[in-house]
Amino acid sequence: MNSKIIFMGTPQIAADVLQALLNANANISLVICQPDRKVGRKGTLQACPTKQLALQYNIPVFQPEKIRNDFQRVVDEHADLIVTCAYGQIVPQEVLDAPKQGCVNLHGSLLPEYRGAAPIQRAIYDGKTVTGMSLMKMEAGMDTGPVAAMAKIEIEPSDNTTSLFEKMGKLAGELVVEHLDELLAGTLEFIPQDDSSATHADKISKEEEQLDLNMSDVQLLNTIRALSYTPGGYVIANHAKLKLLSVRYQPGETPGIGVFFALNKKQFAMGGHEGIFLLDEVQPEGKSMMKSADFLNGKGRSLINKKAGE
């Protein structure tokens, strides 16, 4: 496959798509991703997953701080196609116009539903049982371009954002590879979206990370799933953040909303409105994630019969 393809993407879901293209022998001539970022307490610079993968395959990497101001490298590549997935920046018109067959994006929803920055998270947050991946033509608007193909996937009750991202990365890779020959030939048909049916998926805000115990039990469970494992939804317990990362819900008798208790020697739990939340994995502030039994054997004991937020 000699046609030159530029791939634009940053996180693991994008790396999964890039890997699928490489497995299909696509000629990826350039990978564009966000600049290396400092991570951890030591502030060590870390390359994103797509850069790490590109370097394994000796593919050149371009990391502009702001691609709207620094796009000439893209124009000079004279690519046939640009494929994007979760790049993380608004792509300027100069980039959209650069490749012979234009730019396509893999968007994590069944468009026009959930246009915006957090479609996968918002689908879980809203209690959806089905979502999907859309292969769309990029244009100036936010996820407003015409769509060529979609692939659906069920959201299991056990899914959180992390597990659904993994499934969606695989789905996106399969979708673009299936239509790659048509994309490169310019023969794939794109159908305009119905703007009147559009919904929006705003980025998760810092304020939403603090769990609102006034929510219904169902909404609270969906919110925890949508925030897990990253960034993690939290409650305040003993004046510190306690992230609730893996939770199961059990309807029935409750000690009261937000009240912590031990269901048995191994299971830490919290009361809901009409049932209880089994807290299988939690993360105390400043600590690593831990299993319910381990937390209960340590700091969790001090929370028994106490209420979140007090």
Image (spheres, helix red, strand yellow):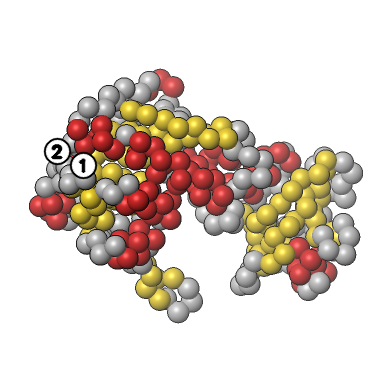
Q: Can you give x and y, in whole percent of width and height, for residue 20 in the image? A: 37, 48
Q: CA distance from mark 1 to mark 2?
A: 6 Å
**Total label count?**
2
Q: Amino acid at mark 2?
A: Lys
158 displayed left or right of 180: right
The residue wearing badge 2 is 100
Quarter of the picture holding the C terminus:
bottom right
53 lies above or below 194: below
On the question of residue 59 being in view, the answer is: yes
Quarter of the picture holding the N terminus:
top left
Q: Secondary structure at mark 2?
A: loop
The residue wearing badge 1 is 81
Report the residue at 40% width, 76% height from top.
44
31 lies above or below 157: below
Q: Can you give x and y, in whole percent of width and height, for residue 18 in the image? A: 34, 51
56 displayed left or right of 94: right
Q: Can you give x and y, in whole percent of width and height, for residue 299 in the image? A: 77, 72
Q: Amino acid at mark 1?
A: Leu
Q: Dot 1 surroundings within 10 Å: few (below 14), some, or many (20 or more)?
A: many
Q: Does label 1 or label 2 sit earlier along the sequence?
A: 1
Report the residue at 44% width, 36% height from top.
133
Viewer-proximal residue among 68 and 27 = 27
219 displayed left or right of 294: left
Q: Are marks 1 and 2 in contact (CB under 8 Å)?
A: yes
